[in-house]
Image (spheres, rainbow, N blue to C red):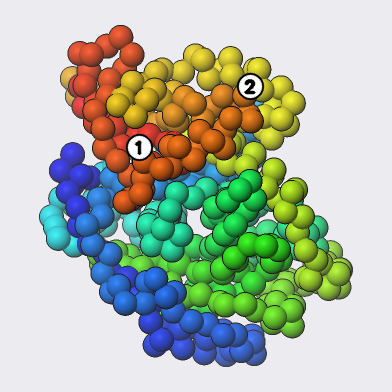
Amino acid sequence: MAALTNPGDYAVKSDKKLATAVRRALYQKTGLDVDVRPVPELAGMHVRSNVRPFDLLFGLGRTTSALPGLHSPGAAGLPGLAALRTASRWAIIRYLWAFHEYRPQIYLSELTEQVRFHQRTLLSEHFGIAVATDLVEQFILRRPAKVVDADAVTFDPVLAEAMRNLKAHKPDYFWYDTHAGRVSDVVVVEVKGNSSSRQTTVRQLARGVQQVLVPVNVPGATMRRIVIGACLRGDALEAFAVEVPDPDTRTRRVALESLAEDEGSSPETLADIDEADDYLNTEVSQERLTVEVEDLDQARLLAFAGIPSTLAGIRVNPGEIMEAVSQLEVIDTARGAFRCETTRIPVGPRSLNLRTGVAEEFLDLLNRQATSPRRERYRAQYETGIYTRVPGSPRGRSDEPLTVVTSADGCMLSVSLV
């Protein structure tokens, strides 16, 4: 496990030279001149140090659990994209082997080299999500945050109504924080990744700038639009980031038109562009936004614990979900009890046990009024970082001691070889 738990470094680039290159690439492709800047929190960093690959995988799992439609029927009528039942477990298990134990820089293993050219899009995209999660949660918001997938939102009239045909051209995620029961900070993030070159990364970031321009502003909240890319060059990992501050309506309209052209300018998309004018300056309802994103984040937590659910199920029939939650394994730690799903993978005569779960108190859908105060108390324990390591064990089985990593959003991850 040393390759996962030994801290290391990866390169970070977010400076004026990068921002200028991205701005130029965007202008050359679309004629759109956008104010692209470095991300202030990352501008002087150069190297992200003292990060554990284990934490990158944990972040990847927590973020990919925000997938919309996990409840939808798939092959054989099984719900939740059955083979990927919780995106968290799948994302973590898939890349347990991907890191070399050598440090100080985080290198990918030789095994990675053997598959990257056949699965490089998937590999680089997922490392992009891992890096974006790390940078947003550790440095940009700098406090416990929540995340929802942009494809799942209905509160944004441009994303949900005017530009429903943008498909993959939407941004990826909304990270947000709340204060006094209202959304107070929103970070719209588009994630990119490649295994080729920095030049490719610049083109990808330029594309991402267009995508983060799509969402409408949230009244009463600080809103930022950031593009983060990861490049796997050789066996090393590099991150790149730029930001678009306060775009005006004309800039956003031109960006939408350019994205629609890339989609092929179907009649439906062209109609959406005409309709988008009515939505670009629409103010999102804070009340609707707050309710929806909190429920979407609750769905993410349930998925991370192994219970894919619908928003309708959370709101209308929480009893069934709570019954499923009660069947999950309980892990007791000094931070409290966690309900989790356990995956056991044979490794010769031994077993690799991977557990992903959520603090029991966050899964009480029958007492929703107490959820926010519970989260605030839990978050208060994480003033100096997102992750904490504590000892734990399955309830009633002290013969299997575990090292449990918990995060400020109430999630937990444990990997053990028994």
Q: Nearer the viewer, residue 112 or 269?
A: 269
* Residue type marked 2: Leu
**Element carrying mark 1:** strand
User: Is 402 situated above or below 301?
Assistant: above
Left/right placement of residue 193 relative to residue 282 reads left
Could you tell me the amino acid type at mark 1?
Answer: Thr
Labelled disc at residue 200: none
CA distance for labels 1 and 2: 24 Å
Q: Disc 1 or disc 2, which is closer to the eye?
A: 2
Residue 340 at least partly seen: no
The residue positioned 43% from the left and 53% from the top of the image is: 143
Q: Position of residue 387 (x, y in %)?
A: 33, 44
Residue denoted by label 1 = 406
Q: Residue at x 65, y 50 (%)?
A: 182
Q: Is residue 252 left or right of residue 105?
A: right
**Residue 294 at x, y percent in the picture:** 62, 42
Instruction: Tell which of 44 and 260 is nearer to you.
Output: 44
Which quarter of the figure is the N terminus placed in?
A: top left
In this figure, which residue is indicated by the disc labeled 2? 366
Q: Position of residue 279 (x, y in %)?
A: 81, 67
In depth, the one of 307 and 257 nearer the eye is 307
Instruction: Tell me which numbered mark, 1 or 2, is placed earlier along the sequence.
Output: 2
Res 200 quadrant in image: bottom left
Q: In the image, what residue occupies the spot 49% across and 14% down?
A: 327
Can residue 205 be seen at all in this image of the molecule?
yes
